[in-house]
């Protein structure tokens, strides 16, 4: 049944209304009685859907929904289908959510129990997607449904089993109506949201924190006093805009942050989790982009203001997305913050309640220079935002953070604070209660044991966790507790005993290599990448990973240490025979990624094609280069800079271009052709970044040196003259631009010939300048020359030829010759 309003075939029959609904334009209409409520065979825009459900008696219904959605072209992720024998549940669920576009949560008595796996799945999905679509499949008390989704509407299928047993044909009708409701959500409301979110995800490239939620939602106890302090601050302290939690290592700051974000989802609207050693998770620009993305998922009005600022809309194509990425890459941190956060927020309707952005482990974002741009942002630019936006920050008492946040009174977890001691006692009591070796103890003996452990922990919940794990795995005995050191020293001692028990003398032969690469990696290390670097199969790599057990966590990005203190211990003298120097592994990892870069495919136009492990070549290699010999190879660095520039990573490209320029200047002198070439490369980058003043200055310097050293009509000098013309044109200095364009064109005609591709580029650039100056006849004449020349030299389908076709169309449109312009646009 096609929609009479827009003619779309994407229509659904709504049984309760006895009408059809168009999911494209939302028009409802009646149909002749003969028409049956059947859905189209395939969805126009298939989705990847994550199913969250309890393993209970509702499985046949959920399987049927899965099958029917897949018949329409959707793919459905469900744990019993996708998780294999070797897969860890948390890691598998995290990957499933990451690889999907939306989530459907089936609510039953089993799935809503607290604590429970499904509740954690819902929390993770809400954090990742910003929305979850619930379906009630059993009668569940309202208070059992997670508060984060209680406000949502859901289809009610709680009596499906009774209907199924009573009348199969009536149940089929009932089921079809419910299926169409779900399809309406998935392919209607969810389609536009997923499309907009997908475009924003491509442009903003937000960092994922699914792994943090997966790791820290389970087993969290205590800290109620801290939650109460937070509630008091949110609801009653209107003057304070920063809630700063300061505590030492092992106090559970990240676990608190994750559970705060989950418990107060209506209040905490954005999160950022720093991670020392991760290039991505210590990058302040990525933090701003990630928070902007999260706000866009939460608030329709913010998303409506943000998308046009980026030149995006629902269904944005590759061209718009690429342009948005390029424009965003030109901005520095301050401009990015204004463009994505402060300016879109300024026009929003005032919120009556305090809303919170959370930033965890700020101290881990401190650069080796001692500067912490994220804490500087909070103490400076973030406080310029509307007063209903506030911040929660957690950190160690690091000087780089304290210096910026010291005017905000911190909520400090002190080791001897009675409230902290009570939390540790609660955790210890519950954890010890699960251990078989204390089952025969009296309640009084357990209290004494717990008291001793809490004293030795020096306030660190991580200390207690390591002791409990040691007792459970047998690397520690109850009678040894009295010999343990207190605090961080005791934690390190526990690491030593646990490693000795688990790995013993086989440590170097079994897992040290993998562990060293996890420590060396500038971010979470994918298991498949680890296997390639180690030169082993994926099965062996998986065995190493399983042997390391809970010491590693695996998020969507890959493997990382379960806690920062483990890496600190392995790199210290306290680790003894388990000392792991990651410097050699950093070099090996860098050399592997460099070989991937060197093996890249380049087409006949010099455009880079596929690169093995490209994401990591882009993200990590610059971080690893300083420990590699190639760091002092100016030619290789320039090649890598060109690649980074091609990928619109201007900040990284500038570091490399400038290092190559400085190196060549020192080694070869200022007027060596290679040095001048490096100078010109910096100029090109400045132009791409939109820094036209700097570009002009560099081009003039490079041109003067090229003319002196190589000659006025050398190809390099003519290329720079053309670049200078382009830079002046961008600054609207049309007269100056024409001078250099003409100079480059005439020189290239003499030296290279009238049909050389470089000559034709000069013709095209001059034509575009004429178009900007509204000299349409001159522009048309030159663009026709460029087009005809490119057709002869490069062929009818070459990208440069088609660019000339598009240029001709632009001229014709400005001249009012719309039919001819349309013909050229169609060809292009």
Image: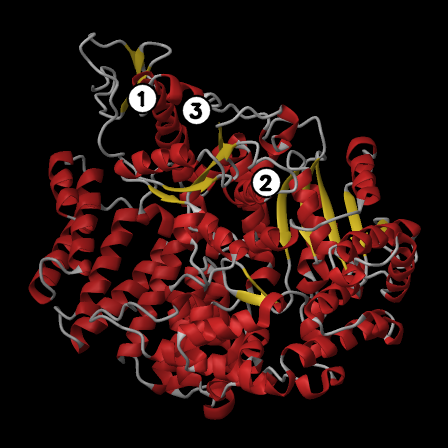
> Which secondary structure lies at badge 1?
helix
The residue under label 3 is: 161
Which of the colour schemes (rainbow, by chain, secondary structure, one colour) is used? secondary structure
For image coordinates 58% across by 72% down, the residue present is 548
Mark 2 vs mark 3: give the one in front: 3
On screen, residue 16 versus residue 240, left or right, reads left
On screen, residue 72 versus residue 440, left or right, reads left
The number of discs equals: 3
Give the mark, 1 or 3, whose residue is nearer the N terminus.
3
User: Depth check: 362 or 148 in front?
Assistant: 148
On screen, residue 455 versus residue 692, left or right, reads right
Q: Is residue 258 visible?
A: yes
Query: Residues under labels 2 and 3: Cα distance?
Result: 23 Å
Mark 2 vs mark 1: give the one in front: 1
Quarter of the rendering occupied by the N terminus: top left
On screen, residue 262 versus residue 479, left or right, reads left
The residue under label 2 is: 119
Q: Is residue 746 above or below residue 185?
A: below
Give the mark, 2 or 3, whose residue is nearer the N terminus.
2
Q: Label 3 near label 2: C-beta < 8 Å?
A: no
Query: Percent from the top left, x then y, of residue 603?
Result: 22, 70
| Location of residue 478 by image quarter | bottom right
The residue under label 1 is: 172
> Which secondary structure lies at badge 2?
helix
Q: Label 3 near label 1: C-beta < 8 Å?
A: no
User: Depth check: 730 or 689 in front?
Assistant: 689
Query: Percent from the top left, x then y, of residue 687?
Result: 42, 62
Which of the labelled discs sits on residue 372, or is there none?
none
Which residue is farthest bottom?
A: 667
Q: Is residue 584 above or below residue 787?
A: below
Query: Percent from the top left, x then y, of residue 676?
Result: 41, 81
């Amino acid at each position: 049944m096609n929609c009479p309003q827009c003619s779309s075939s994407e229509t659904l029959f709504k049984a309760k209304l006895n009408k059809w609904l168009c999911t494209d334009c939302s028009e409802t209409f009646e149909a002749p009685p003969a028409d049956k409520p059947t859905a189209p065979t395939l969805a126009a825009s298939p989705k990847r859907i994550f199913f969250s459900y309890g393993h209970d008696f509702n499985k046949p219904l959920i399987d049927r929904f899965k099958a029917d959605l897949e018949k329409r072209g959707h793919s459905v992720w469900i744990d019993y289908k996708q998780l294999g024998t070797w897969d860890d549940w948390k890691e598998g669920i995290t990957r499933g959510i990451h690889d999907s576009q939306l989530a459907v949560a089936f609510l039953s008595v089993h799935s809503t129990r607290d604590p429970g796996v499904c509740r954690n799945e819902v929390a993770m999905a809400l954090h990742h997607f910003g929305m979850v679509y619930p379906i009630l499949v059993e009668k569940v008390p309202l208070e059992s449904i997670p508060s984060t989704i209680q406000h949502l509407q859901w289809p009610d299928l709680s009596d499906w089993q009774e209907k199924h047993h009573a009348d199969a044909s009536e149940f089929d009708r009932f089921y079809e109506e419910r299926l169409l409701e779900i399809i309406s959500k998935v392919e209607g409301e969810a389609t536009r949201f997923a499309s907009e979110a997908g475009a924003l995800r491509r442009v903003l490239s937000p960092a994922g924190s699914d792994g943090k939620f997966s790791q820290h939602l389970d087993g969290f106890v205590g800290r109620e006093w801290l939650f109460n302090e937070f509630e008091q601050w949110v609801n009653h302290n209107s003057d304070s805009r920063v809630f700063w939690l300061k505590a030492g290592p092992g106090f559970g700051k990240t676990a608190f942050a994750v559970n705060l974000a989950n418990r107060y989802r209506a209040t905490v609207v954005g999160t950022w989790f720093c991670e020392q050693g991760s290039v991505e998770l210590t990058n302040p620009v990525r933090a701003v982009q990630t928070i902007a993305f999260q706000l866009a998922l939460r608030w329709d009005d913010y998303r409506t203001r943000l998308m046009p600022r980026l030149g995006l809309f629902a269904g944005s194509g590759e061209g718009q997305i690429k342009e948005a990425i390029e424009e965003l890459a030109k901005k520095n941190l301050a401009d990015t913050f204004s463009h994505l956060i402060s300016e879109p927020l300024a026009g929003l309707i005032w919120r009556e309640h305090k809303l919170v952005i959370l930033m965890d482990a700020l101290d881990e974002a401190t650069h080796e220079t001692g500067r912490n741009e994220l804490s500087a942002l909070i103490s400076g630019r973030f406080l310029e935002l509307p007063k209903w936006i506030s911040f929660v920050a957690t950190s160690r008492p690091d000087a780089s953070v304290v210096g910026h946040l010291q005017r905000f009174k911190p909520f400090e977890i002190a080791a001897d604070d009675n409230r902290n001691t009570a939390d540790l006692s609660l955790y210890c009591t519950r954890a010890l209660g699960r251990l078989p070796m204390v089952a025969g103890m009296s309640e009084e003996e357990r209290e004494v044991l717990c008291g001793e452990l809490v004293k030795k922990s020096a306030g660190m919940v991580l200390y207690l966790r390591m002791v409990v794990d040691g007792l459970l795995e047998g690397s520690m005995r109850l009678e040894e507790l009295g010999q343990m050191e207190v605090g961080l020293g005791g934690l390190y001692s526990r690491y030593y005993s646990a490693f000795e028990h688990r790995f013993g003398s086989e440590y170097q032969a079994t897992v040290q290599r993998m562990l060293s690469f996890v420590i060396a990696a500038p971010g979470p290390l994918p298991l498949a990448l680890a296997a390639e670097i180690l030169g082993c199969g994926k099965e062996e790599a998986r065995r190493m990973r399983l042997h390391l057990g809970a010491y590693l966590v695996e998020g969507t990005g890959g493997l990382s240490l379960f806690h920062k203190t483990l890496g600190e211990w392995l790199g210290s003298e306290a680790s003894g025979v388990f000392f792991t120097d990651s410097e050699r592994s950093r070099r090996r990892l860098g050399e592997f990624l460099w070989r991937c870069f060197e093996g890249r495919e380049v087409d006949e136009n010099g455009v880079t094609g596929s690169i093995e492990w490209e994401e990591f070549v882009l993200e990590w290699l610059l971080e690893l280069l300083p420990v590699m010999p190639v760091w002092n190879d100016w030619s290789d660095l320039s090649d890598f800079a060109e690649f980074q520039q091609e990928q619109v990573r201007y900040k990284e490209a500038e570091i490399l271009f400038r290092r190559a320029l400085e190196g060549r200047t020192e080694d070869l002198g200022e007027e060596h052709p290679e040095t001048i070439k490096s100078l010109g490369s910096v100029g090109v980058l400045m132009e791409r970044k939109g820094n036209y003043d700097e570009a002009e200055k560099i081009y003039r310097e490079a041109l003067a040196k090229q003319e002196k050293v190589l000659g006025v009509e050398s190809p390099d000098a003519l290329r720079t003259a053309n670049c200078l013309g382009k830079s002046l044109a961008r600054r609207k200095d049309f007269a100056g631009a024409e001078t250099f364009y003409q100079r480059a064109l005439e020189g290239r005609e003499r030296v290279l010939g009238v049909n050389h591709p470089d000559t034709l580029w000069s013709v095209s650039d001059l034509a575009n300048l004429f178009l900007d100056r509204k000299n349409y006849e001159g522009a048309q004449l030159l663009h026709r020359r460029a087009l005809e020349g490119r057709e002869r030299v490069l062929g009818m389908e070459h990208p440069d030829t088609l660019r000339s076709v598009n240029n001709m169309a632009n001229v014709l449109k400005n001249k009012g010759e719309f039919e001819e312009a349309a013909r050229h646009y169609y060809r292009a």
